[in-house]
Amino acid sequence: MAVFFLLMLHLAYPAYVQGEIYATDMQKMDRTVLRIEGGFSYQTVVEKNNYSVFLPNGTYEISASHFDDNGELDFFVNETVVVGVQDQEVDLVLKPIRQNGMFYLLIGLALAGVIAYYLLARRKNANAGEPETAEMRINPEDEPKRAEKKMELDEDAEKVLDALERMEKRATQKELKEALGFSDAKLSLILTELEQMGHVKKFKRGRGNVVRKTR
């Protein structure tokens, strides 16, 4: 019975967890939002660059967030802490959002959305006027017509080929972009389609691409 009581007392005894809050350049971070997740949830605003909490034994996720003057998250860190019966110091070093990869993740998702929207719009334009009945979709006699339609060039692709023809069938991708006024994403998609259809060939040169008309 005594052993059981001591064990329960050991599990319930809170430990003192404290530490300093810094940025990666060791600059002290004030007014950070401290959040603790484990056996319970706790959140507070740390006015100065140090914190201290009492926590029962267990494993906790301790995160600290800092927001700029516009209210946007600019620094963040998350640490896993195992609390025992002994007090311990856990310094929190916040990393800029860009270093955490979140900034580039958002940019990548935005670009992927733009490309997906452009491809969907091109597909809708290519399929405009085609019958949408199940019979037409599965009729084998329509396959040659569909293949022929896919090989047709749209207006933007024709513009790229015309520009290459004027440039003696060879130009850098940057020169094409400036001549046509297309965005990088749009021109890259068009060149990829033209290369798959055998109209152009791309070669890597330095930091850019050289495009050569093959037909």
Image: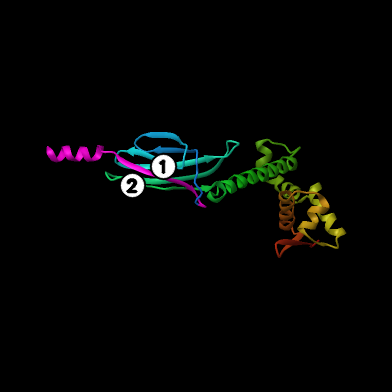
**Outermost residue, right direction?**
166
Quadrant holding the C terminus: bottom right
Q: Nearer the viewer, residue 128 or 179?
A: 179
Label 1: few (<14), some (14–19) or many (≥20) C-alpha neighbours in 10 Å: some
Q: Is 42 left or right of 12, judged from the image as shown?
A: right
38 is within the stretch colored magenta? no
The part of the image, by quadrant, that contains residue 134 is top right
Q: What amino acid is at disc 2?
A: Gln
Find the magenta span and give its range: 1-25
Q: CA distance from mark 2 to mark 1?
A: 14 Å
Q: Is 170 left or right of 135, judged from the image as shown?
A: right
- Percent of width and height locating residue 20: 43, 46
* Numbered label attached to residue 74: none
Indicate the secondary structure of the residue bearing disc 2: strand
Q: Is 24 left or right of 161, judged from the image as shown?
A: left
Q: Is residue 124 above or below residue 100?
A: above
Residue of label 1: 62
14 is within the stretch colored magenta? yes
Residue of label 2: 88
Q: Nearer the viewer, residue 167 or 152?
A: 167
